[in-house]
Amino acid sequence: MGPLVLKYPVQKLILLLFLALAVVPVLNILFHIFFTPGVFRTTLASFNLYTWRLLGQSLLLATAVALLATLSGTALGFFLFRSDLPGRTLLRTLLLIPLFLSPYLLAVAWKDLFFLSTGTTAFITSPAGVVLVLTTLYTPLAMLIAGTALAAIDISYEESGWLLAGRRNTLLHITLPLIRPALFSAFVMVFIFTLSEFSVPAVLGVKVFTTEIFTRFSAFYDHTTAIGQSAVLVGICFLLLAFEARYLSEAPFLSLGRRGGHAGLYRGRGLRRVGLFFVLFWLGMSVVLPFAVLTGQAFHGGMAVMARALALLLPAAPSSLLLAAGGGMLILITGAAAAWRRPGTPPSPLNRGFDLLLLLLFALPATVLGIALIHFYNRPSLAFLYGGPAIILVGYTARYAFLAARLTGNALRQLPASFDEAARLAAIPPLRRLLHIHLPLLLPALAASFLLGFILSLGELGTTLMVYPPGTTLLPVKLYTLMANAPQPLTSAMTLVVMSITFAATTLAYLLLSRLLKRSPYAASR
Amino acid sequence: MQPAVEFRHITHAYGSREVIHDLSLTVAAGSITTLLGSSGCGKTTLLRLLAGLETPAGGEVYLHGTCVTRGSRLLVPPERRGVGFIFQDLALWPHMTVLENVAFALRSRHDADAGGRAHTLLDRLGIGDQAQKYPHQLSGGQQQLTAIARALVLNPSLLLMDEPLANLDVKIKKEILTLIRSLHEREGLTILYVTHDHREAFSLADTVVVMREGRIVESGTVGEIKRSENEYVRSFLEY
């Protein structure tokens, strides 16, 4: 066994580095508010009627989006995980598309849609418009959470209900109560994401609490107030997570090839019809229509507009892709280190502690994280980090390492302890066990972690916008700054260019990883 | 003759639930001993304690006269105990072929003829022609034989088997039991075999140990157990 520090020293080193680089800045900001004389008082004084109204508006928007997304996500989850709908695997995948795009791209697409169909953007640039866009954005997440919970229900619970009370009663009184914790989790998660979301309200020009913090910080250079207001959001997120930490931290919906669960399918022609109508309607509304309109608008100004969009954005592509790849790798390494334990064993206190820390950073509003990083790193002694792309990589890792930790943790949980025990009894050394037994079996989860980290880093705007050093040009930042003064066709064309680059890079990364997986020993075992 | 295994006053708990209570047991070298009892009586825990995969709360474990575990201290780690273990789920590494599964331990010891030796063993067990297949491509019986080959490849003096035949049909079960018997006779192996099926236990064992709730209820030869007056043993054998 040996002392705690000597066991898995590389893991401890990675986690220590992460603590120092990403967690300490967030703790530092809280320390600054509560222990620097006058800051707490200034923060309190900054809360006038206008600020309270913005906070209230943010909370209302978050409640509405969480409610709508949970309801529609549960319905979609039911049809796509528990009914015999034809093509449900493909439909599930298509519906997840919005989750993999940067939210502001979706906002531009919706703006285009309303402009084209009504001739005005009045509705979409109102709080109701933000609710609409964010509901379409987060419904797939709620679908994933509710659907996974539905799929994990043991069929025998429901079969006994069907025999005694019929399918409708079983659905209402057995199935739904059984997935209540998942529904609550979906609500909390969407609520936190909406409350933290900066880019959609910013693109749609709707003032909310996160845009106010950004304005205070970037336009008025009122750092003290911005930091104080950030603390309020941090407090709300912490409070909500305290209720839900256990379930969200387990995040069973973040698994590959999940075991267990013998859920049966609800069948029937009527159900299939209703299901197909609802799913296709949602797919059309949330994916097909906005992107079709965006494409139409992008080409509306002719090829010259598209050429201009390409000329403006292509120079930023290489650095964006490179940083996103670096981010994906760091996210994978940090997440895997946080989740690592001997396969088949329950999470250690270290795993659980980091799970919670990563979840908190994941839920932290991107702008708040940005402010925390600037506040901590903006000093001469740390200029080597603050003045270069390293600060952006710290931001990416802090934001998304939770996802990699969950994917790896859930994959580790599925490896039977006996795989490792059999190797230990055969006197196979730890490094050889890691390289020849554990890593090949974890490869799909590690590849998925990298891919997810890469995609999300490529589209990250909230933190990047705050911390990017002068001279660094990145796609999301460039698009965001250009679109403020660009005519609508050029904005659409630029959005389409960013989407295409994201799609092409993701497809390429996916193909490369699939090839790697096919050549790996893991593929042979399937 | 020195016993192969000795448990002295072993106690073990999972959290606050004590699963082994002051248990002592001696296993003769070169014997086949079956631990018989219903689910949750502590049979598997006893095997895991012997292999060093778990540590007891109290007591001592001896292997061939050497104390390998004292209280919660592992004096000899699992990899140096020289035991073969066949897990209930077999634990065949799914990404390795049958040959790789068996040869892996030898290759880790830089054995230049790892493949050849593993192949010879597979041939002896009658599955040499399956060497290039993956575990999921095998029948239940073939998977079982692969697990046996993997456990035997380092020539252990003690083989621990945790309900290895639980999911096999009667015919295959019979064939594998015969094979285990012949391996035992040929190699002089000491085998500790866990099962909840008394027919399986009786067809294989020299000594049968009946367990209940972490305690030994009765132990003896097959004949002695069959004639036992103990009420629990009698009721257990009725099923």
Image (cartoon, rainbow, N blue to C red):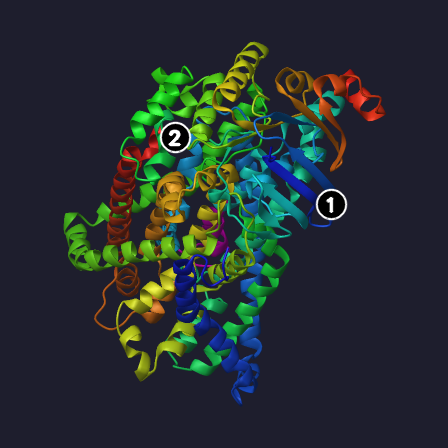
Image: magenta residue range? A121-139
Does A498 appear above or below B125?
below
Residue B208 is at least partly visible in this image: yes
Residue B101 marker: 2
Q: Is residue B24 magenta?
A: no
Disc 2: which chain? Answer: B
Q: Amino acid at mark 2?
A: Asn
- Expressed as whole percent of the image width and height from the top left, the position of residue B216 reads 75, 33
- Pointer 1 and pointer 2 on the same chain: yes
Residue at figure coordinates x 43%, y 73% from the top left: A372
Q: Is residue A137 magenta?
A: yes
- Apparent side of residue B116 relative to residue B171 in the rendered image (left or right): left
Q: Determine crowd level at label 1: few under 14, some 14-19, many 20+ residues with C-alpha closer than 10 A.
A: some
Which residue bears the numbered disc 1?
B18
- Apparent side of residue A191 relative to residue B134 in the rendered image (left or right): right
Mark 1 touches mark 2? (CB < 8 Å): no
